[in-house]
Image: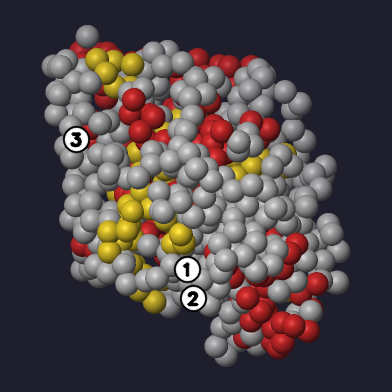
Amino acid sequence: MSALLSLSVFSPIPGHAGDWDFGSGKNQQSSLFGNGVSTKTPIKHLVVIYQENVSFDHYFGTYPKAANPTGEPSFRARSGTPVVNNLLANGLLEQNPNTNSANGTGAALPFRLDRTQASTADQNHAYTAEQMAYDDGKVDLFPLYTGNGSSGGVGAFGTKGQVLGYYDGNTVTAYWRYAQRFAMSDNSYTDTYGPSTPGALEVVSGQTNGLKLIATTQKPSTKEASSAYVSDGQGGWTMVNDIDPGYDTCSSATNQGMMTGRNIGDLLNERGITWGGFMGGFDLSLSNSDGSTGCTRKTYSTIVSENVADYIPHHNWFQYYASTANPTHARPTSVKSIGYTYVPGTSTKDPANHEYDLKDFYTVAKYGNLPAVSFVKMPAYQDGHAGYSDPLDEQVGVVDVINMLQKLPDWRDTAILIAYDDSDGWYDHAYVAPTHGSFDSSADQLNGAGVCGTGTAPKGVDGKPVNGRCGPGTRIPLIAISPWAQRNHVSHTLTTQASIVRFIEDNWLGGKRLGQGSFDATAGKIDDLFDFRGEPHTEKLILDPDTGDIRSGSISGNDSSKNSNKDDSPFNAGHSSSSSSQSSSASGLTGLLAAIWSFLSQYV
């Protein structure tokens, strides 16, 4: 037994799904046994890396063709890369409706942003402004309504025409490499028009109606003045713009709100399935190297040349719901408690209530107790939000997380989704006529005064049709990284942020829906991003966080360090391979020994 324990100590503990009753505590999912909780697919661990404020064309407007200037990381696509619905494929780089004279000095053609232009202005991404930019589907008024320029910028970069700028594979190199090796969608949208907080709610609940105002100095949002909410037409409020979560220690004292509906965390709790929200800056007890701590803990970015607060309350998905909130930022009892409602082995609720710091995600992964479902948010300087973040800092944070996850024994049954809360108002040529209408006389302007979409208004939390939920809204990136992801694949299936909620429900909850008007029931499926036949491709794609290039000597399947700037080697058609089967057998033995150690360590 001692030899067994000694071997197990050096083996990372796998986080497979399973049910286990810890003494007098509630029945919770445990990482100890992989067959206790059944899943519809082989995916036992889902990690949603939820980034900020990027339109699809802003990052993939010329994919897979990069300019490859001297001095920047080069990118050359695999042969057979699928056609993508973007600016390049549609001839919109040479002829574009945003040369419309109504845009004034901001009228311009889309233009390439290089790595020296990683720091940009924040564009206008309010609910009404985005509708007006799309201009009844003509998509021709982005500079006028959402554009902002950078002071001192040359050419369009210094005008409202900056909104037409896009990056290519020489700057967002890692994302283009992930798209080559794994799968992405070119037809994924926000559920509604508008900024971060509505997007944060959609990806965990599919619902923005049911806002309860805790404190506000604002009046309902209008065409002339944006605020966090509009009247839903039924005596309640729908959130359409940003507002801080109620009672959070770090929230604004004058503008706070809570949601009255349910979120995916509630459903996972009912089934005893482990989950967590992991946010940069959430642990207020930590101090950064500059001595900053608490709600003002910050990180200096050399790209945007400013100190950026790590934690932004209005990005915190689960903090808006009393059932899943941790307003004081209480710490988990121990690393063993992360992902659980109750402290394992007791009937005591863990004070963290599934809300943790990003550092806790690294810790629980290293410990081998990765929750079944994890939502990850980078510290703000790495979240991609224009104005205080940038694609280079973003790449470092995201690649670090993905490199780490690929090295875990759990990698075989893990899926990572890189998704976004909104488009920041950046130009994207794709437009979908809203199927969920909204008819607020002032805030809705897409198809004319007081009209957004011709479809019926969707239901609110009380089951009645409500305003303020017009969508689908703007197109955003969605990338799937997994041994089970399709290879070099582009999905054209229409999906939205609530599609992620639906995947969790379908995979872990037998298709149970949230109800209360959630978009989960009607959201498109993301299944086309995956191929669950045969064996998974467990080889890794380890990238350099700074350049996005394939790391020399990394385990990268058919890619070699000698060919790190070109990713055109052929793929096997199926998932089966003897090497992956042998690897999975070894991983399974390691996981079993580690699981035994994890179990015994709680009682010995």
Q: Is residue 300 visible?
A: no
Q: Secondary structure at mark 1?
A: loop
Vertical position of residue 19 compared to residue 380: above or below: above
Give 21 or 200, whichever is nearer the viewer.
Answer: 200
Identified at 65% across, 17% down, the residue is: 534
- Which of discs 3 and 2 lies nearer the camera? The answer is 2
Q: Residue furthest top?
A: 1
Residue tagged by mark 1?
Answer: 221
Type of amino acid at the residue the image marks with label 3: Asp
Place of residue 261 in the rendered image (x, y in percent of width and height, measured from the top left): 38, 42
Q: Which residue is mark 3?
A: 350
Q: Relative to 423, say whether 206 is above or below.
A: above
Q: Secondary structure at mark 2?
A: loop
Callout 3: SS: loop
x and y, in percent, of residue 400 in the image: 45, 50
Q: Do the numbered discs 1 and 3 sit on residues whose CB atoms are within 8 Å?
A: no
Q: Is residue 158 visible?
A: yes
